[in-house]
Image (cartoon, helix red, strand yellow):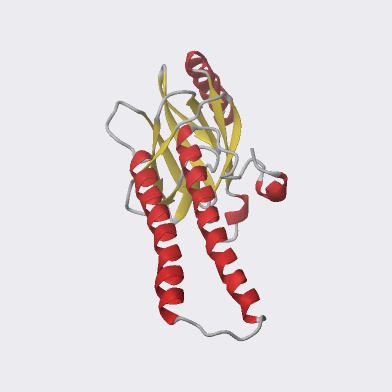
Amino acid sequence: MVPFLLGGCGGPLSTLAPAGPVARDIAWLWWAMLGGATALTVLVLVLVALSFGPPRPVRERRWTHWLGLGLSLPVLAVTLAGGLWVGERILPRDDGAITVQAHAVQWYWEFTQPGPDGPVTTRDRLIIPTGQPVDVLITSADVIHSFWVPQLGGKMDAVPGRQNRLRLLADTPGRLEGQCAEFCGLGHAIMRFEVDVVPPEAWDDTLRDAAETAGDTDD
Ligand SMILES: [Cu+2]
């Protein structure tokens, strides 16, 4: 839950409203970094306030060694350790995850999911089940784009000639939103997509419906 002070940071494109464990790890890291930055800022403000007081002898060793290093190093060490730990946890791994493809084109996303009757391709709509790790294979047809569903996972570039992999994991059904996060031309701002998260038992039917809808559109 985003505190009221950060109300503007909520909404469907917020990393601070995670809808799955991967995004929750990233949000946790964000809060840890905010805490560290706040501690350092408070220290600097206290020093500034002290400078308005009566002149006093300054012991350089105390300020540079004990406060300068003594506060900065633990904050940096904790956030670095947190970053490495979270980075390792959210990496895709070979554990039988579902694989979907996200192909970026100026300016839309084409998703291919493994449906019950064969691959199902949808435009600007990704359909995934809850509770199962999903690895997104990300490619681009033209320029560099970036795949991002802030409530589900990290951000990954779509680079022409390469295939990148990103893990998503959702824990409750619902409709989420994604956005291209790398400026890719005039249509970049409208390069949004939706993510339908459905219960595992409804995944096949949802994909079958999506395949029929796509077929109707092609006719
Ligand atoms: Cu873009």
Residue 62 is left or right of residue 175, and the answer is left
Residue at 46% of width from left, 23% of height from top? 131
Q: Quadrant of residue 103?
A: top left
- In the image, residue 44 sits, relative to residue 192, either above or below, namely below
Give the camera-side residue of 92 and 210. Answer: 92
Residue 43 percent across, percent down from the top left:
56, 67
- In the image, residue 160 sits, relative to residue 205, either above or below, namely below
Split into 4 quadrants, where in the image is the C terminus?
top right
Give the camera-side residue of 162 and 10. Answer: 10
Q: Quadrant of residue 13?
A: top right
Residue 87 percent across, percent down from the top left:
37, 46
Residue at 40% of width from left, 29% of height from top? 133
Residue 192 percent across, percent down from the top left:
59, 45
Residue furthest to the left: 94
Give the camera-side residue of 182 and 214. Answer: 182
- In the image, residue 41 sits, relative to residue 50, either above or below, namely above
Residue at 40% of width from left, 48% of height from top? 82
Residue 10 percent across, percent down from the top left:
66, 44
Q: Residue 146: in sight, yes or no?
A: yes
Residue at 33% of width from left, 46% of height from top? 163
Q: Residue 183: in sight, yes or no?
A: no
